[in-house]
Image: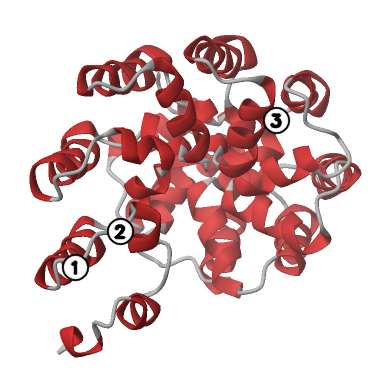
Amino acid sequence: MEISGSQSSSNIMWFFRDRGFDDRSIHEMFKKCKRLERVQRERASENWAYLRSIGIQERKLPSVVSKCPKILTLGLNEKLVPMVECLATLGTKPSEVASAIARFPHILSHSVEEKLCPLLAFFQALGVPEKQLGKMILLNPRLISYSIESKLTHIVDFLASLGLTREGMIGKVLVKNPFIMGYSVDKRLRPTSDFLQSVGLTELDLQRVAMSFPEVLCRDVDKILRPNLTYLRRCGFEDGQIAALVTGYPPILIKSIRNSLEPRIRFLVDVMGRRIDEVADYPDFFRHGLKKRLELRQKLLKQRNTDCSLSEMLECNQKTFLVKFGLIEGLA
């Protein structure tokens, strides 16, 4: 595509070159935003300086503008300042707003009145506490680009279909993982919930998973969940035990087999001399650090030739553990 030869276009070309953009990057931005051809260099400079003034580092600005060149064409006081000031009221630290804009600069192209305010009202109606609203938006600023009617309502209806109530429970899920709203119900969330039910999770189990670790619902069945299920079966777990493991510790289906599950199960069987059945009764076994907790405590118990259940061994802090088993001197 040929860039217009107008004076305005020439000015903006030099504006970009002065800031280190190469011709290819400039052409790509012109493709993304036709309005760049007509924007005055003064406006672009003013907007650039403003973005820097709110905490976006100079070295990151080219990346921010490349993602959304439109922000250089927007009215500073009409568009950028109102959105930034509104976002600032939602954050606890000034840096959170700059970070959110750097990750999703398109947020500045949306209207406070037409997009942000309705979005906040939508979440408040779901019982999301006011303090958490900002956390959600700033953690996943892309939320502002989603349609409430065709996207977000669909997600809420899906969560309600799992038995979660709209008066608080769904709000807690969304606060825990705001990114869940970016997934397709039909292509990702429903296939995942169907898979979990096929493993043996009841509706109540599924609700517990959604409430405690909604990230599991967002993972691809064939790429992540099914391989982990196959591995657990290969280890000797029966389907009922796997359902108990998943309900008790949902990340077991998304943790790395090689780096997380395999080393712990090998340690459980080969070093601790325990049966895998024991972790079905205590799924939180997989939550504990291998080096900092499992190996250390196993070593101390072995020195004293002490037997105990996994929960007795792990379900307490280090001081309580040492006192419980008379191992205070073992800390030294």
Which image quadrant for residue 76? bottom right
Instruction: Give the side of residue 214 with respect to residue 160, left or right.
Output: left
Residue 14 seen from this side:
no
CB-based contact (under 8 Å), mark 2 and mark 1: yes
From the image, state whether disc 3 or disc 2 is nearer to you.
2
Residue hosting label 3:
146
Which image quadrant for residue 217? top right
Residue hosting label 2:
308
Q: Which amino acid does the dot numbered 1 rest on? A: Leu
Q: Which amino acid does the dot numbered 2 rest on? A: Cys
Q: Which amino acid does the dot numbered 3 rest on? A: Tyr
Q: Which of marks 2 and 3 precedes in the sequence?
A: 3
Residue 139 seen from this side:
yes
Give the secondary structure at mark 3. loop
Give the secondary structure at mark 2. loop
Q: Where in the figure is residue 16, as x and y percent of width and height?
A: 39, 50
Q: Residue at x 72, y 22 (%)?
A: 162
Give the secondary structure at mark 1. helix
Picture disc at residue 301: 1
The residue nearer to you, when weighing 64 against 317, is 317
Q: Where in the figure is residue 114, as x and y percent of width and height?
A: 86, 40
Q: Where in the figure is residue 250, as x and y percent of width and height?
A: 47, 36
Instruction: Give the side of residue 266 with respect to residue 40, left or right.
Output: left
User: CA separation, marks 1 and 3?
Assistant: 54 Å
Q: Where in the figure is residue 87, as x and y percent of width and height?
A: 72, 61
Q: Residue at x 19, y 90 (%)?
A: 329
Image quarter where the C terminus lies is bottom left
User: CA separation, marks 2 and 1?
Assistant: 9 Å
Q: Eyeballing the image, is 270 above or below 128? A: above
